[in-house]
Amino acid sequence: MKKIYLAVVVLFSFLSVACEKVDDLLTFYIEEKEVITIESHFPVGALVPLTPITVTTNSEETFKNNKTRAELVKDVTLNRLNLTITNPQGENFNFLKKIEIYISSEKKAEVKLAYLEEVPANATTLNLKSTNAELDEFIKGDTYSIRTQAVLAKPVSRDITIKADMRFKVTADPI
């Protein structure tokens, strides 16, 4: 009886490790970099939508380079979204109180992608929290739009340019 129990434990351990290895082989990342501009005329304290950004995907090519196809993609989530001020240099995010980023497409309704409820003082880079929303249909399409809403903590005297570095984790089915 002990031998059967040991064999079952070993078998489940092997299958668990094997499944993780297969998932690792079928998982890859898509990196996107976009620019967000906060203009100097935005009101303080109100949730203000910024101009949406249309992103053209190269998903078919990316899938092909990772030896898969769109119909085999089973799971896409936001793995990372970092914001960094690129202009003016030396600026920090003290002007910002709260930020939310949304994703949408012609075929799919808008979904909250990431957010930060409280912006830390003197931060020069922000790491937003992912909502872990399912993003398969957005990434499989030809384009999607990114929309940002921000609450300013203090007036902005000049336009601020922010680089958004996004990384999507993509997992595909083997068959």
Image (cartoon, grey):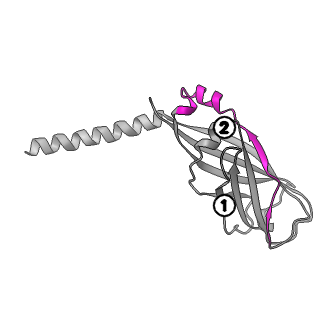
Residue 141 image label: 2
Is residue 99 toward the left or the right of residue 20 in the image? Answer: right
Q: Residue 50 vs residue 12: left or right?
A: right
Graded by Cα atoms within 10 Å as few (under 14), some (14 to 19) or many (20 or more), the crowding at tag 2 reads some
Asked if the magenta segment contains residue 43, the reply would be no
The N terminus sits in image quarter? top left
Amino acid residing under circle 2: Gly
Give the residue at mark 1. 115
The residue carrying pointer 1 sits among few (fewer than 14), some (14 to 19) or many (20 or more) residues within 10 Å by Cα, namely many
Residue 98 x, y percent position in the rendering: 72, 67
Q: Height in image: 159 above or below 141?
A: below
**Which percent across, then down, holds residue 107?**
67, 44
Residue 99, image x, y percentages: 72, 63
- Residue lying at the far left in this picture: please name it: 1
Instruction: Find numbered disc 1 in the image and state the secondary structure of the residue it sits on.
Output: strand
Dot 2 or dot 1: first in sequence order is 1
Q: Quadrant of the C terminus?
A: top left
Q: Secondary structure at mark 2?
A: loop
Circle 1: residue type: Tyr
Report the front residue among 55 and 159: 55
Tell me what residue is drawn at x 61 percent, y 42 percent: 137
Q: Nearer the viewer, residue 20 or 123?
A: 20
**Residue 155 placement: quadrant:** bottom right
Q: CA distance from mark 2 to mark 1?
A: 23 Å
Q: Is residue 50 magenta?
A: yes
Q: Which residues are magenta?
A: 46-71
Instruction: Classify residue 114 by image quadrant.
Output: bottom right
Residue 76 is situated, as x and y percent measured from the top left of the image, at: 56, 44
